[in-house]
Image (spheres, rainbow, N blue to C red):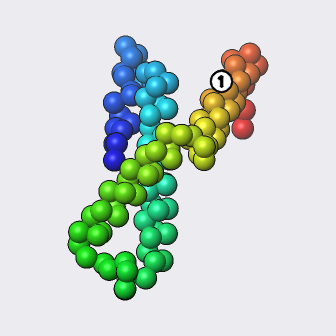
Amino acid sequence: MLYVNPLLSIQPTPRGESAFIGPSREKAALEELERFFLFTLLQEMRKTIPADGFFEGSAEREIFDEMMDDALSGVMAQSGQLGISKMIEEQLRIAEAQHTLKQDLVRETGAALK
């Protein structure tokens, strides 16, 4: 699985604040979140299949199944058809816009909103 370190997308600014770099890293992190969700979903679904008879539970079979789930979840996340990362991204944009509007209103009125 692809692992994205969220701390790598944060660069300190001269005033000590943190500034995020590039939407591409954010998009990669959201896609990885969707991939992990799908991987977990596939793993849990696979647990419902009986391990006797045709689907024997050998160590080799478990490794193959995990690799298959990883590959399948990656393809599913890249396709974007489920839309989890897109929905989270939209919610983040809405929250950022609300935060910006609140800060602008506080600056204009000179009073803190509660």
Q: Position of residue 41 (x, y in %)?
A: 49, 62
Residue placed at 43% from the left, 75% from the top?
47
> Looking at numbered disc 1 in the image, what kind of residue is underneath it?
Thr
| 81 displayed left or right of 28 | right
Camera sees residue 66 = yes
Within the image, what quadrant is residue 101 found in?
top right
Farthest residue to the bottom: give it. Answer: 52
Question: Residue 52's x, y, as percent?
Answer: 37, 86
Q: Is residue 82 above or below residue 25?
A: below
- Is residue 36 visible to us here? no
Residue 14: percent from the left, percent from the top?
Answer: 37, 13
10 Å neighbourhood of mark 1: few (<14), some, or many (≥20)? few
Q: Nearer the viewer, residue 37 or 60?
A: 60
The residue tagged 1 is 100
114 to the left or right of 67: right
63 up-or-down from 10: above or below: below
- Residue at 43 percent across and 46 percent down: it is 74
The foreground one among 55 and 82 is 55
Toward the right, the furthest residue is 109
Quadrant into which the C terminus falls: top right
SS at circle 1? helix
- Residue at left 60%, top 47%? 82
Q: Is residue 75 above or below residue 54?
A: above
